Each structure stands twice: as structure tokens, then as C-alpha cells.
């Protein structure tokens, strides 16, 4: 009998799923199909917490209501037909997430090899790869806590941190030389070519999000939550370089941003079969804050220092998108997700643009249409009760 029932369910999924029914609906149809009409009764009772009508089916076997009232709703008796609490119900729990992401549009071109030696200030012909300090994938994390206010709403606080660093070096053998792309053009060392150049580049951020989320649309197969909250953001960009000839000359920069603002978004989950589902999340944050930037160059030849700083208020727009697969345990106490995420920070001052502003004396267009982006993998684990 169990084999026949399993066979019927499998065929029901194959035949009815393309019609737009999820596995829970297909199995529920099969449950009604295999029971004699004389042994099935349906009664409707109000759900005290959500106000929705709850359907209880009783037959020859143990009823779903009896299973729901058992001591452990995670038991195998609770199948995909949702005898337990609906999968979309908001729960209290702890959140942990591992990020493997990369900062893009954050590279700094710091030096190029040319066919030297040539007269100081004269243009050379490039004869090798440009020295670029570009960032690769690094690990970050999120930790947080979610508190359920009722079945349909909850409040969450999440802290995110990401640190990324890269280094690069290029050299030249005589008669070729290496020319700096980051020194001030009017400094003494700008006209002096080098044999070796090194650079380091880092981009770090910390975020604190406090969100209220509420169920907008629900069924046995899907849920859509809207999100409204606040975000605090800190961004730190550091660059350092060294150029060796008769001595060592250095160029160092630092850009910091701190701000806070509003955050809104949508979160969707669509059940596939059993505890598996497909999810997508999108958010927009509007963060008002200040950029503080500094530039310092030390010339070994003249023993002089070039120093410049810049401060400006900006509203940074942050757009976040994530999509992937999720698994939820039968009772909903454990949920795991794995997906790919994109995050864009717009109207942002970046290291390469700041260096060019100092070199050219033009500070007016530093953040026009400038963006800093992050993308990569996100794996999340939630324990809920």
C-alpha cells in the first residue's frame, strides 16, 4: 500500500506540477484522491494568530491535526502536505552567514614599464603590462538575530563585515624603466623613473541593518515579505605604493565613509518539493554621510612631502540583489540558503579617482556616476524557534 501510494504521488508531481502546483498542493490532491469520500471530513477553524482559515483533514489514518498536536512536529509523520505550521510563518532565531565576494571597480593602476631611459617628462612607449593593484575574492560574514512579533511580522538586526586586500609589484631591467602613475606630476620624483614599483590596495566595509519585515503575500507554496528599516555603513579604502631608484619614494592614500539612512526591499520564497525552495531578495538603501580622503607623497630626492585632503557630504545609493536555493527542515527550525549576490554602491569616491583628482587639480567630478560593486557567493544558516 505504501509503495502504491508513493508511486501515485510521484506521478501526481510529474503530471500536475507543470500546471503551476507546488509539491505540497500535488500531494494534498493525492491525499484526497486515495481516501473514500465517506471517510473524509473537512472543517474550517480560525487561526488565532494569522486570522486565516485552517483546513483539517481526518480519515482512517492518524489525522493531520493529531500529528500537529504531537510532541515533535519535526517527526517524519509531518510530510510535505504541511500538517505543521506554514513554512512562511515568521520565527525568532539566530542568523549566521559566510560571504565569498569580490570588490570590483576598485583597482588602482600605479605604474607602467616604458622603453627608457628617456628625458624627464618625455612620453615613453609602454613595453609591458601595467602595474595594477586589483582585488580578488575574499571572505566576509554576517551575524544577526531575528525576533518574531507574530506569524506575519518580525524585526531583525544583522551585522556584516568584509575585508579585502591585494598587492602587486612590477620591475624593469635596464635600459627599460618603470614610471609612476600616482605621483603628483609637479613633484621632483615624478620626472625620475624607477626600476621597481610595489603597491597594496584594500577595501573594507561594515554594515549594521535593523529591519522590520511583514508578509505581503502567502500560500502553501510561496511567500513575499516587504522590508523597511535602517542601515549604518562604514567604508574604508587604503592604498600604499613604493618606487625604488636611488632611494624609496612613497604615495599613500586613504578614503573613509560613514553614514546612515533608510533601507527597503522585497524577499520572496517559492517552494519546489519537500523542504527545497527558490528564493530571491532585493534591497535599496539610501545612506547619507561624509567622505574623508587624504593623499600623501614623500619624495626621497627633495625630502619634500605632497599632502592633500578632501571632505564632502554625499548620499550613497546601495542596491543589493541575491538569489539561490534554500532548504527548510520539516518543522521549520533549521533553514539553509546558498546563492549569488550583487551589491552596488553608487555616488562613491574611489581611490583611483581621488589620486587622479590630486594629480590634475580637478575635484568637481570625483563621484559623478562612480560606483563600487561587490559580487560573490553567500551561504546562510538560521536556527529558529
Image (cartoon, rainbow, N blue to C red):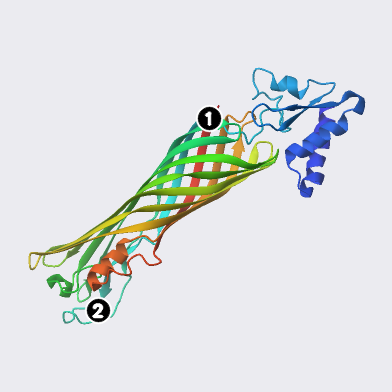
Q: Position of residue 383 (x, y in %)?
A: 52, 30
Question: In the rendered view, does 250 fall on the left or right side of 152?
Answer: left
Q: Circle 2 sits in a helix, a strand or a loop, which is it?
A: loop
Viewer can see residue 71: yes
Residue situated in front as seen by the camera: 290 or 252: 290
Q: Position of residue 171 (x, y in %)?
A: 24, 67
| Relative height, residue 202 to residue 306 (above, below) | above
Residue at the image point whose x is 24% and y is 81% from the top: 123
Residue at the image point whose x is 35% and y is 64% from the top: 367
Residue at the image point whose x is 35% and y is 62% from the top: 107
Question: In the rendered view, does 353 fall on the left or right side of 13?
Answer: left
Instruction: Specify the quadrant of the image occupied by residue 159.
Output: top left
Q: Which residue is mark 2?
A: 115
Quarter of the image that includes the N terminus: top right
Mark 2 → mark 1, Cα distance in angstroms: 65 Å
Q: Position of residue 310 (x, y in %)?
A: 24, 61
Instruction: Specify the quadrant of the image occupied by residue 214.
Output: top right
Question: In the rendered view, does 311 fall on the left or right side of 250?
Answer: right
Residue at the image point whose x is 30% and y is 69% from the top: 364
Q: Which residue is mark 1?
A: 92
Viewer can see residue 165: no
Q: Residues within 10 Å of mark 2 (few under 14, many from 20)?
A: some
| Relative height, residue 193 to residue 259 (above, below) | below
Q: Position of residue 14 (x, y in %)?
A: 79, 45
Instruction: Specify the quadrant of the image occupied by residue 104.
Output: bottom left
Question: In the rendered view, does 167 fall on the left or right side of 374?
Answer: left
| Relative height, residue 375 to residue 159 (above, below) | below
Quarter of the image that includes the C terminus: top right
Q: Residues within 10 Å of mark 1 (few under 14, many from 20)?
A: some
Q: Earlier in the sequence, mark 2 or mark 1?
A: 1
Residue situated in front as seen by the camera: 310 or 93: 310
Confirm or deny contact between disc 2 and disc 1 (CB under 8 A).
no
Amino acid at each position: 500500500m505504501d509503495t502504491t501510494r508513493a508511486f501515485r504521488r510521484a506521478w501526481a508531481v510529474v503530471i500536475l506540477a507543470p500546471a503551476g502546483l507546488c509539491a505540497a498542493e500535488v500531494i494534498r490532491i493525492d491525499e484526497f484522491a486515495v481516501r473514500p469520500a465517506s471517510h473524509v471530513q473537512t472543517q474550517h477553524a480560525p487561526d488565532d494568530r494569522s486570522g486565516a482559515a485552517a483546513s483539517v483533514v481526518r480519515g482512517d489514518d492518524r489525522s493531520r491535526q493529531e500529528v500537529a498536536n504531537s510532541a515533535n512536529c519535526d517527526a517524519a509523520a509531518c510530510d510535505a502536505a504541511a500538517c505543521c505550521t506554514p513554512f512562511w510563518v515568521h520565527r525568532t532565531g539566530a542568523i549566521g552567514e559566510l560571504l565569498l565576494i569580490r570588490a570590483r571597480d576598485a583597482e588602482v593602476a600605479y605604474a607602467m614599464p616604458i622603453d627608457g631611459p628617456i628625458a624627464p617628462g618625455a612620453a615613453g612607449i609602454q613595453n609591458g603590462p601595467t602595474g595594477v593593484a586589483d582585488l580578488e575574492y575574499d571572505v566576509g560574514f554576517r551575524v544577526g538575530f531575528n525576533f518574531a512579533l507574530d506569524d506575519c511580522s518580525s524585526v531583525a538586526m544583522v551585522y556584516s563585515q568584509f575585508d579585502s586586500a591585494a598587492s602587486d609589484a612590477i620591475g624593469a631591467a635596464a635600459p627599460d624603466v618603470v614610471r609612476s602613475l600616482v605621483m603628483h606630476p609637479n613633484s621632483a620624483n615624478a620626472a625620475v623613473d624607477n626600476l621597481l614599483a610595489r603597491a597594496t590596495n584594500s577595501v573594507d566595509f561594515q554594515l549594521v541593518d535593523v529591519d522590520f519585515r511583514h508578509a505581503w503575500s502567502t500560500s502553501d507554496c510561496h511567500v513575499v515579505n516587504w522590508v523597511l528599516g535602517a542601515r549604518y555603513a562604514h567604508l574604508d579604502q587604503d592604498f600604499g605604493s613604493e618606487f625604488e631608484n636611488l632611494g624609496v619614494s612613497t604615495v599613500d592614500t586613504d578614503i573613509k565613509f560613514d553614514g546612515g539612512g533608510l533601507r527597503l526591499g522585497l524577499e520572496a520564497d517559492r517552494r519546489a518539493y519537500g523542504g527545497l525552495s527558490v528564493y530571491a531578495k532585493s534591497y535599496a538603501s539610501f545612506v547619507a554621510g561624509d567622505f574623508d580622503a587624504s593623499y600623501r607623497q614623500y619624495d626621497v630626492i627633495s625630502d619634500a612631502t605632497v599632502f592633500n585632503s578632501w571632505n564632502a557630504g554625499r548620499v550613497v545609493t546601495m542596491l543589493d540583489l541575491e538569489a539561490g536555493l534554500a532548504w527548510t527542515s520539516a518543522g521549520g527550525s533549521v533553514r539553509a540558503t546558498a546563492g549569488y549576490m550583487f551589491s552596488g554602491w553608487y555616488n562613491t569616491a574611489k581611490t583611483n579617482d581621488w589620486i587622479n583628482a590630486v594629480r590634475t587639480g580637478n575635484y568637481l567630478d570625483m563621484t559623478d556616476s562612480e560606483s563600487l560593486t561587490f559580487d560573490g557567493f553567500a551561504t546562510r544558516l538560521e536556527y529558529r524557534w
